[in-house]
Image (tube, helix red, strand yellow):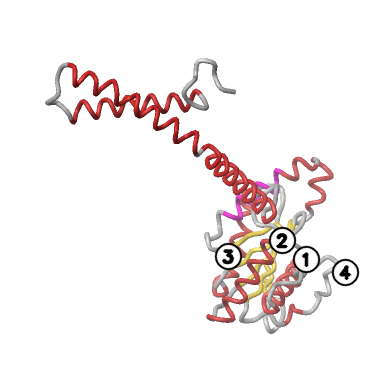
């Protein structure tokens, strides 16, 4: 609502802006016209601010609808960005969710097919996480998931992608990471163990060079337990995810808290608890 004393502009802040600019104009005029003196100088300094105020008020009135439209567009853009952020990120941990994971897998598969590369996929699952929720409550379980996420992220590159795929299951995409995927997986596993979060993780690894054996269903994986890729991911990356997932369940069957790598000759045990 327009202030009662503000008769020159649409709002008090506009009048304040006009007065400020008027003062600047007046001081500038004084600095640029030192040769003037007496009545001409006084008239000049009085007229300049008045002219500035009138011009600003007229311009603001004329373009008020434009400014309102610009503000509305900015608000809509911010809302759209917020919705996009929510649609592609896990609300608890803040990392990518399954939808974003699928999209990035697809893009990496296309990139690798076109330019070559050796992407790798790491699948992680918390060991006996249900007991944490049962004994300590879901709030404590959420805290564990958040702390675990931070520990894992600290061991990854900025170019890597980590996503929460389900309650206590995570996926990691390493672009051109096949050569060091096993070392990264072991670093992730040992990092969780050393942090003493009250949980350990089982890890499955597959690279583009050798995902063959674990593309079939793991004999240790219960039906329906695999976070198979939704439609849309490239077939090569889908094969990679399934291979890593099968290796993950082999790790659990072998005693948990270990890394199993899917290879052409069969899952290879990398760590024994």
Pick whichever of labels 2 and 4 is earlier in the sequence: 2
Residue 16, x across and y down, in percent: 43, 24
Pick whichever of labels 1 and 2 is earlier in the sequence: 2
CB-based contact (under 8 Å), mark 4 and mark 3: no
Q: Which mark is residue 184?
A: 3
Please, what secondary structure does the residue beneath circle 2 have? helix
The answer to if 144 sits in the magenta stretch is: yes
Q: Which residue is mark 2?
A: 98
Q: Quadrant of the N terminus?
A: top right
CB-based contact (under 8 Å), mark 3 and mark 1: no
Pick whichever of labels 4 and 3 is earlier in the sequence: 3
Please, what secondary structure does the residue beneath circle 3 have? helix
User: In the displayed structure, does residue 100 sit left or right of residue 5?
Assistant: right
Please, what secondary structure does the residue beneath circle 1 have? loop
Gap in angstroms between the C-alphas marked 3 and 1 = 21 Å
Q: Main secondary structure of the magenta part?
A: helix
Q: Which residue is mark 4?
A: 223
Q: Quadrant of the C terminus?
A: bottom right
Pick whichever of labels 3 and 1 is earlier in the sequence: 3
């Amino acid at each position: 609502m327009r202030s009662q004393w503000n008769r020159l502009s649409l709002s008090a802040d506009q009048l304040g802006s006009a007065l400020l600019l008027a003062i600047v104009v007046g001081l500038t005029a004084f600095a640029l016209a030192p040769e003037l003196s007496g009545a001409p100088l006084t008239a000049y300094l009085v007229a300049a601010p008045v002219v500035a105020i009138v011009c600003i008020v007229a311009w603001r009135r004329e373009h008020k609808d434009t400014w309102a439209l610009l503000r509305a567009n900015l608000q809509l853009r911010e809302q759209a960005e917020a919705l996009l952020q929510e649609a592609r990120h896990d609300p608890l941990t803040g990392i990518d969710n399954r939808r974003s994971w699928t999209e990035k897998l697809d893009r990496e598969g296309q990139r690798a097919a076109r330019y070559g590369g050796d992407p790798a996929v790491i699948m992680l699952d918390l060991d006996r996480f249900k007991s944490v929720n049962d004994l300590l409550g879901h709030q404590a379980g959420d805290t564990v998931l958040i702390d675990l996420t931070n520990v894992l992220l600290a061991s990854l590159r900025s170019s890597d992608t980590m996503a929460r795929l389900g309650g206590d299951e995570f996926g990691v995409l390493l672009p051109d990471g096949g050569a060091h995927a096993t070392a990264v997986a072991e670093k992730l596993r040992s990092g969780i163990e050393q942090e003493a979060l009250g949980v350990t993780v089982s890890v499955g690894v597959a690279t583009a060079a050798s995902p063959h054996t674990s593309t079939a269903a793991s004999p240790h994986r219960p039906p329906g337990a695999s976070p198979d890729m939704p439609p849309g991911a490239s077939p090569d990356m889908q094969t990679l995810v399934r291979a890593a997932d099968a290796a993950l369940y082999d790790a659990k069957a072998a005693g948990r808290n270990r890394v199993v790598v899917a290879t052409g000759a069969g899952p290879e045990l990398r760590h024994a608890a």
